[in-house]
Image: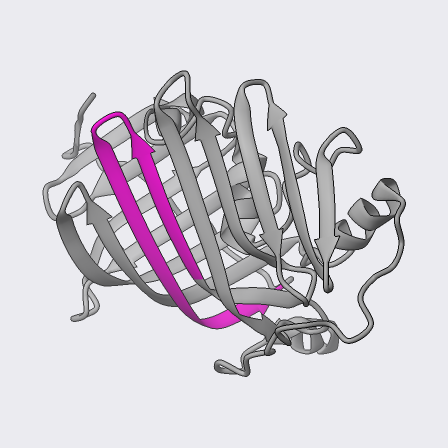
Amino acid sequence: MMLTALMACKTRKVVVTAPPVVEKPVLNTKRAENIKLLKGKDLPFNTLSLKGKVNLDLNGNENNVNVTIRIKKDEMIWVSITAIAGIEVARALITPDSVLVRNNLQSVGIKKPFSYLNTFTSKQVTFKMLQSVITGNTIADFMLETAALEQEQGKFTLTGDKAGLAFRVLFNTLLKPAEMSLNDVKSGQALKVMYADYQNATGALFPTVVRINAVSGKKKTNIAFDFSKTDRNVPLDFPFTLPKRFEIIN
């Protein structure tokens, strides 16, 4: 119980400000060591619970709701969306293999393979990549010595191409991602993520503001998270059922 209490982060918006310029910039010129340095700033966790507000804009259909996200590292991402009145509107459970969604207002559900999400993003986006996007951690597939890594006044820029997916990651002076762009020109898909208001979550930094903009053909998805509470390495449940009365839609 003592360990759990120590690991929990329940502060509200104690933001760690990134200085505009690092007076003593990182001088290491070895790419492998710099990549290791950036990866070392990742938020380590076994479980993560996030609570806050989210603005959802799906092809111009905009909603402001409350959101709870629970993550069991590399295994599942659980999402609950509630209206301002406290009524749960929808729930989702994402695993490396599947996507389950239920719309409580319309009593309909979705059961799809993980590749269903690739209709909104590039086909190269994996579960672990999605997990990193939400948490503001580096993406393992991009942190390679073959990627181009430039540094100016303590700010790094990582660029490269992974199986046709061009990526560009800008790191701030805290050595945490500030902006990430993914482009799959061949399929006409693009994803841009912006991070701000980093907060100290028991010794590691977590972005409390996350903006995700995705374009896939004519589909446009904009998601703006504003997290107010972060709990790390606490016991979590991931309840999900599709009641028999729910219609499964394609």
Asked whether, in this view, residue 50 is left or right of residue 246, the answer is: right
Which region shows up in magenta?
210-232
* Quarter the N terminus occupies: bottom right
Which quadrant of the figure has residue 42? Answer: bottom right
Q: Residue furthest left?
A: 106
Q: Nearer the viewer, residue 208 or 233?
A: 208
Q: Main secondary structure of the magenta part?
A: strand
Q: Nearer the viewer, residue 161 or 101?
A: 161
Residue 33 x, y percent position in the rendering: 88, 47
Asked whether, in this view, residue 247 is left or right of residue 38, the answer is: left
Asked whether, in this view, residue 250 is left or right of residue 214, the answer is: left
Q: Going 58% across and 65% down the picture, which residue do you hit?
A: 206
Which quadrant of the figure has residue 188? Answer: top left
Residue 98 x, y percent position in the rendering: 43, 27
Asked whether, in this view, residue 238 is left or right of residue 154, the answer is: left
Q: Going 73% across and 53% down the picture, which residue do you hit?
A: 151
Residue 28 x, y percent position in the rendering: 89, 54
> Image height check: is 164 above or below 109?
above
| Residue 216 belongs to the span the image colors magenta | yes
Q: Going 71% across and 36% down the picture, which residue do you hit?
A: 148
Residue 189 x, y percent position in the rendering: 37, 27
Q: Residue furthest front?
A: 152
> Image height check: is 203 above or below 127?
below
> Image height check: is 183 above or below 198?
above
* Quarter the C terminus occupies: top left
Q: Nearer the viewer, residue 164 or 23?
A: 23
Q: Going 21% across and 68% down the picture, which residue do you hit?
A: 86
| Residue 75 belongs to the span the image colors magenta | no
